[in-house]
Amino acid sequence: MFITAPEFLPQHRDHRHQIVQIISAAEARGQTRLAEMNQQVLTSLDNIITGLQDDTGSGEATADAS
């Protein structure tokens, strides 16, 4: 189980930016499988970031990748 907190939002956003770059480069090189695997990571990061942003307004302090 992975649990995080709003104070880690900057790290999650940085990680998301890196993953987007990896996906773009992989697609440009025709590395479909690498792009697909990192798309799953991107989806998880989007869920984490959205959850943490939502939690900051509701008083809840954690989010997970599920």
Image (cartoon, rainbow, N blue to C red):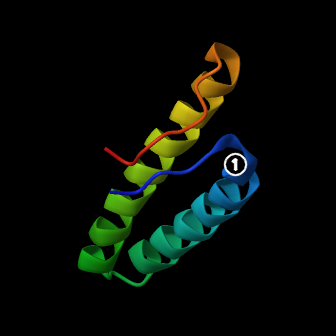
Question: Where's residue 47, x and y in %?
Answer: 44, 40
Q: Note whether 66 is above or below 60 in the view shown.
A: below
- Outermost residue on the left side: it is 33
- Residue 66 lies in quadrant: top left
Which three-letter amino acid code belongs to the residue tagged 1?
Answer: Leu
- Residue 57 lies in quadrant: top right
Question: Where's residue 44, x and y in %?
Answer: 40, 51
- Considering the numbered disc 1 on the image, is that residue within a helix, a strand or a loop? helix
Q: Note whether 59 is above or below 43 in the view shown.
A: above
Which quadrant holds the N terminus?
A: bottom left
Q: Note whether 49 is above or below 35 in the view shown.
A: above
Measuring 62% from the left and 70% from the top, which residue is drawn there?
18
| Left or right position of 41 against 59 | left
| Left or right position of 47 against 59 | left
Question: Where's residue 10, x and y in %?
Answer: 75, 54
Q: Badge 1 is on which residue?
A: 9
Measuring 74% from the left and 48% from the top, which residue is drawn there?
7
Measuring 42% from the left and 79% from the top, which residue is drawn there?
26
